[in-house]
Amino acid sequence: MAKAHILGYPRIGEKRTLKFAQEAYWKGGLTAAGLQEVGKGLREQHWQKQKAAGLDFITAGDFTFYDHVLDTALLFGAAPTRFGFSGDNAQPLSEQDYFALARGNAAQPAMEMTKWFDTNYHYLVPELTVETRFTIQAHEFLARLDEAQAQGHPVKPVLLGPVSLLYLSKAKGVERLDLLDQLAEQYALLLRELQQRKIEWLQIDEPILALDLDDAWLKALERAYAWFRGARPKILLSTYFANVARYQAISPICHRWRAYRSGAGAGAIATLAECLAWALGIVGWRD
């Protein structure tokens, strides 16, 4: 039976609510608690709209106060060490420290920004070193999941995938793929937690599948997802920006596949026939 859901909901809010709240906070006209209330209100509005539209799942984990790549890096304990911040699972970074990563402070310049593939969006580039040790710091992620589940509707969380996270990062003194196994292990622990919270489906985005990846990165996908063979929700592996026919090399890792691009064609369907389920959709070119 077909299920209806969305990849994620635009976080900005009607009349650019989030933008104005951010600017008010930065200028001192809104407290951190006030900013959090705006964020909570937006999330609830977006979930209510998804429920009202008759979707089978509401999407959680798609909201961010600045950038989803930054949030994913922080979720796995990868704040740039040069800032000297030390969040943990019991206490995430303060709003002041969070925005310092994005905007800089008196001691450190902001993290680098670069284009998100061929869109006009720019993301913050995670900074990895030989000292990087990934650890789950999921207090905020799980708190927002609790908010979503309190809506009384099935919830589908979304995560940026481990291979895309590494690919989109920059590393000093270490090869990014040398960090893959410790990162994938932490993802596997989080997936186990989601299973315990009765999450049926988890969307994992791997947008780098739109690129011409070399063998090392293609093999990294198989290597990373091999960590996810234990207890976990069903996985919706999501990609975009390109035709799925090019992904035949990684079809063995395909737990569930999503192709959000026109022109996938019968060839792609035949190539990925071993996938247990298909999900198809339509998005605008720049949405």
Image (tube, helix red, strand yellow):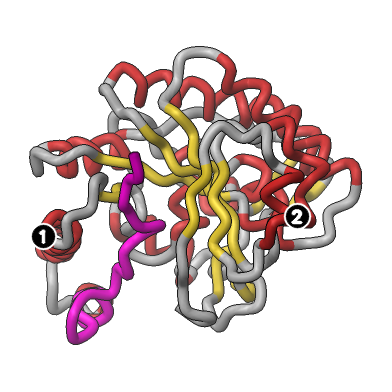
Q: Residue furthest bottom?
A: 15
Which residue matches tag 1?
52
Q: How many marks?
A: 2
Residue at the spot 18% in from the left edge and 43% down from the top edge: 148
Q: Position of residue 10 (x, y in %)?
A: 32, 70
Q: Which residues are magenta?
A: 1-22
| 194 in relation to 81, above or below | above
Residue 79 shows in this picture: no
Residue at the spot 75% in from the left edge and 55% down from the top edge: 267
Q: Position of residue 77 (x, y in %)?
A: 50, 37
Identify residue type, mark 1. Answer: Ala
Q: Residue furthest top?
A: 230
Distance from Cα at disc 1 to Cα at disc 2? 36 Å
Q: Is residue 184 left or right of residue 155?
A: right
Q: Are marks 1 and 2 in contact (CB under 8 Å)?
A: no
- Locate residue 259: give its quadrant: bottom right
Q: Position of residue 236 (x, y in %)?
A: 49, 40
Which residue matches tag 2?
267
Residue 137 shows in this picture: yes
- Locate residue 260: give its quadrant: bottom right
Residue 11 painted magenta: yes
Q: Is residue 22 left or right of residue 211?
A: left
Front position among marks 1 and 2: 2
Quick one: quadrant of the C terminus?
bottom left
Q: Nearer the viewer, residue 279 or 182?
A: 279
Indicate the secondary structure of the residue bearing disc 2. helix
Indicate the secondary structure of the residue bearing disc 1. helix
Q: Position of residue 91 (x, y in %)?
A: 29, 35
Quick one: quadrant of the N terminus?
top left
| 209 in relation to 261, above or below | above
Residue at the spot 26% in from the left edge and 22% down from the top edge: 197
